Structure formats: C-alpha cells, structure tokens
Image (cartoon, grey):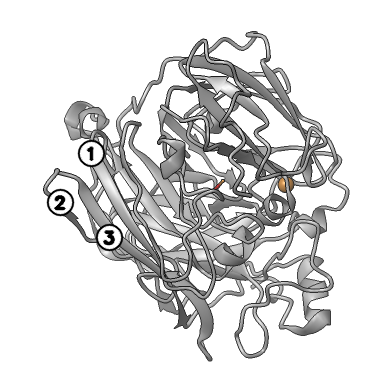
Amino acid sequence: AGAVAAGTGGTLGWWWAAAGTDTAGAVEFDRRLPIPPPAKAHHDAGGRKVFHLRAAPGSHRLRPGRPTATWGVNGAYLGPTLRAARGETVRVHVRNGLPEATSLHWHGMHLPARMDGGPHQPVEPGGTWSPTWTVDQAAATLWYHPHPHGGTARHVYRGLAGLFLLDDPEAEPTGPGGASLPSRYGVDDIPVIVQDKHLDEDNQLVESHPLTSEVGVLGDVILVNGVTGPYLPAGTERVRLRLLNASNARIYRFGFADDRPFTLVGTDGGLLPTPHRTTRVQLSPAERAEIVVTLRPGQRAVLRSFPPDLGLNVWDRRFAGGDDTLDILEIRPNRTLEPSPRLPDELAAAPALADRDTPVDRRFALNGFAINGKSMDMRRIDFAATRGVTEIWEVTATDGAQHNFHVHDVQFQVLSVDGEPPPPELAGWKDTVHTRPGVPLRLAMRFDDHSDAAVPYMYHCHVLYHEDRGLMGQFVVVEPGQEPGGPGTESGDG
Ligand code: C2O
Ligand code: CU
C-alpha cells in the first residue's frame, strides 16, 4: 500500500492536502457504486418529452459516518440522468426548492440562448423555469449544473449536477461480426461522476478556507457518483465508463493501477472518429471521456488518477493538485463474464470545420480573473458572432495558472495545439479544453443556432472559482448582415 491520505480536517490537514495527496493503494473500496437513476419522462400532447427536476437541500452519506448536508436534484445529492435522442423535443421543468436563486445549465447542449440556463436565467426560490428545445447534435455524454453568476462553485460543490445523455440511433457505430459499443445503462455502460471534497471532522463540506488555493477548493476526498470508496461489480467482458470531471477545480489523469490499456471512444461532444488505444486520459473540470475497458474474470481493476500533465511554467503545481495520485473506483469482475461484442473500427467521423492554417478570427488571453483584460460584466456583450459562419478562436492562458476554456451552445474542433495537430484525445467534438500555460489552442466552431440578440451565451474558464470571480465573457449570435451592437445587445439584467 502507498502513503495514506493526508488532510483529516483543520488548518494543518488542509495544508497537507494542498501540498499533495496520495491515496494509491490506501482506499478501501467498500461501497457499491450507486448509479444515478434514469430521469422519468412523459410525453405531452405536443409530443415533447417532459422531465421534472427539483433542486433542494438534503442530507447524504458521502462517506461512512455522519451524513453531510448537501443539495441535490430530485434527491439529496447529484441528480437523475436525463436522456434524449437526436430529433426529440424536450421540455424540462426546473423547480427551485433552495433558499436562494439558482439556474440549471445544459453543458454541451446546442440550443437557443434563452433555454441555456446561464446566469441570465435565474430560477428564484419556489419558482419554476421550463425551457424547451429540439436535440440536434451527435450522441454524447453531456451534463447539467447550476450557473448563477458568482455562485456556481458553491452550488455545484454542494451537489447540484447530473448527466444528460444524448443518443443518435441513426449513427450508432456498428461493424462486422456485430461490433458495437457497450450500451446497457448501469450494466455495461456506467456513469462515473468524479468529484473531490474537503470535509470537516463532522463530515460537513468545507467550502472555503484561509489556505484555499489559487484554483478554489481542492479536496482530498474523492467521490464517484456521490460516495467514497466505490466498487462496481461487473458481469460483462467489456465495460464502458462515461467519465465526467464534475469537480470545481481538480484535474484528473485517469488510468488503471496495473497500467492496462483501454480504449477511448468518446469525448465531450460525441464519439471519436476512431477508437484510440491508450493508458491515460486527462480531464480538466467539465470535460468528459468515454472509455471501454476489457476485464479479466475475477481480476479486480482499480481506476486511478495519476499526477496530471499541467504543462510547463505552472507556478505552483501543488496548489493545482499536480502531484496527486488518487484511487477512484474498483471494478470487480465476476468469475465468469458474459462475452461482449468487439468494438467497431469506425465510430463517428465528422467533417473538418476548417484547416489548421485558417486565419484566426478572435483571440482570447486568459489571465487572472479576466479574459483580454476584462472581467465578466452581466451588462456587457463582448462580441457578436454571425449565424452560419465558422470562426477560428485562439485561446491562450498567459498567467502561468491552471485554466480551461468552455464555450456555450457549440461543440468545437481543436485545430491545433501550439501549431501542431491535436492529439487523438482532442480529435473529436469538444466543448471544454484544458489550456496549458502559454500554449495557444486554435478552435473552430460554427454558430448556427437562432439566438435573439438580447440573451447572450457564455464562454469561460470552468475552474469554477475563476468563473465566479469573472473569468467569463458573453456573446450573441446575430443573423447574417445584422449589425452587432444594436439595441437589445445589452441585456440589462445584471
Ligand atoms: Cu459547464 Cu458555462 O458551464
Ligand atoms: Cu481558470
């Protein structure tokens, strides 16, 4: 067994936690992994698929001992898994049972800005917000979480988050000999929502701390689907894990303790063009990865997070969790396993939006709590994109700190990383990407949604403390020929 987890509460504990946490071999996997329940839905007279969600305070046993005061959606912690297919029209009734305003944002969803659930769509206590839209994008592992300006970190940290899975039955990858991806939810297709928490002696959430790091709260307790020390019984030869980094700040570099290879099949916005065999996949906050792992009968496999590759020039990698090795989840295969179909050779080829040398349309420098020197202002629209036009954005973190970059409404393609073609894990649709200090990323995206000019979309760092402090901007999408900056581009409700 490796070193024991540091950080048992109190100032000294926190200090040690911040200075490096190593739980490799030290986690007792003694709780069966809970699977977030599929959200119930019914169809209304207009054929829309209707969901009901309610955010409310609760109490949940995150780890053995005293339950923790939490917030949850339709339950005490996290929320149910919503699911819809391409072409389906959904309507979600979001009720707020919390003592303060919140919102629910559909992270990764292509939809009109008014349905997006950003900071301009607060739901007051006791209120209900009912967005509706038609799903029009590839099959993907999306998620939802609150987005109240200045309060996102706290609301997510307390437990408000869940998955929103999209299917595209016409584009299901198949291959010779019945090749397909494992896709039985909760059986061989498993949601793995990973979060870190800092808990006090009474198991209550510590939300801030005098020694809190430059990235906000960095926890030394790892939860999967809301519990510590989880194990997953497995009955099939192959298991697909849908990994979501739903942490406020921590970056994970997932792999297996025995270094077994696995297959990366999907990222934020859908499946990769082809399966990618690897031993590590790194996720910064809000990023997703779908991996397929092959099991051996009776042989346990531990999903572990290795010290992430944060890039050069990080001024203090300890405060970004850069030295941490963490045990996440133990998979326990039965002694006899049901055979799984082989994986398809082709998954989801998407046509390239642009060439690598297409000129840059906009540049974004992430520095401190500002983008291009400006902090978020609810009343300021930073720019207008034109509907139907592909734009190239160049994004660079220029302050030596850990950031990432998320854009609402679109899935983008990474054209280059420091001028080079993107690695395989960045070859598919993305909505969030890690920015290594000083390394420019070029992204291609097309805005083809009908946005009215009054309600903006957001782009921001998904380190939630940074976002809350202002590392965020707003854009609108205007019709071709329409002048940006006219009446209505100032939404005025900030
Ligand atoms: Cu996941 Cu603007 O958010
Ligand atoms: Cu940041």
- Does 363 sit above or below residue 154? above
Tell me the quadrant of the picture where the N terminus can be found: bottom right
**Mark 2 neighbour class, 10 Å CA radius: few under 14, some 14 to 19, many 20 or more:** few
Residue type pointed to by label 1: Glu
Q: What number is the disc on residue 43?
A: 2
Determine which residue is flagged by label 3. Answer: 38
Kindly report the distance in space between the C-alpha atoms of the residues bearing marks 3 and 1: 17 Å
In this rendered view, identify the residue nearer to me: 423 or 429: 429
Nearer mark to the viewer, of 3 and 1: 1
- Does 185 sit above or below residue 311? below
Residue type pointed to by label 2: His
Q: Is residue 9 left or right of residue 248?
A: right
Kindly report the distance in space between the C-alpha atoms of the residues bearing marks 1 and 2: 11 Å
* Residue at 73% across, 61% down: 216
Q: Is residue 331 left or right of residue 100?
A: left
Kindly report the distance in space between the C-alpha atoms of the residues bearing marks 3 and 2: 16 Å
Residue type pointed to by label 3: Pro
Which residue is outermost to the front?
Answer: 487
Nearer mark to the viewer, of 3 and 2: 2
Q: What number is the disc on residue 319?
A: none
**Which element is circle 2 on?**
strand
- Does 124 sit above or below residue 292? below
Q: Is residue 360 left or right of residue 195?
A: right
The tag earlier along the polypeptide, 3 or 1, is 3
Determine which residue is flagged by label 1. Answer: 88
**Mark 1 neighbour class, 10 Å CA radius: few under 14, some 14 to 19, many 20 or more:** some
Q: Position of residue 259 (x, y in %)?
A: 55, 50
**Which element is circle 3 on?**
loop
The tag earlier along the polypeptide, 3 or 2, is 3
Which residue is outermost to the left?
Answer: 45
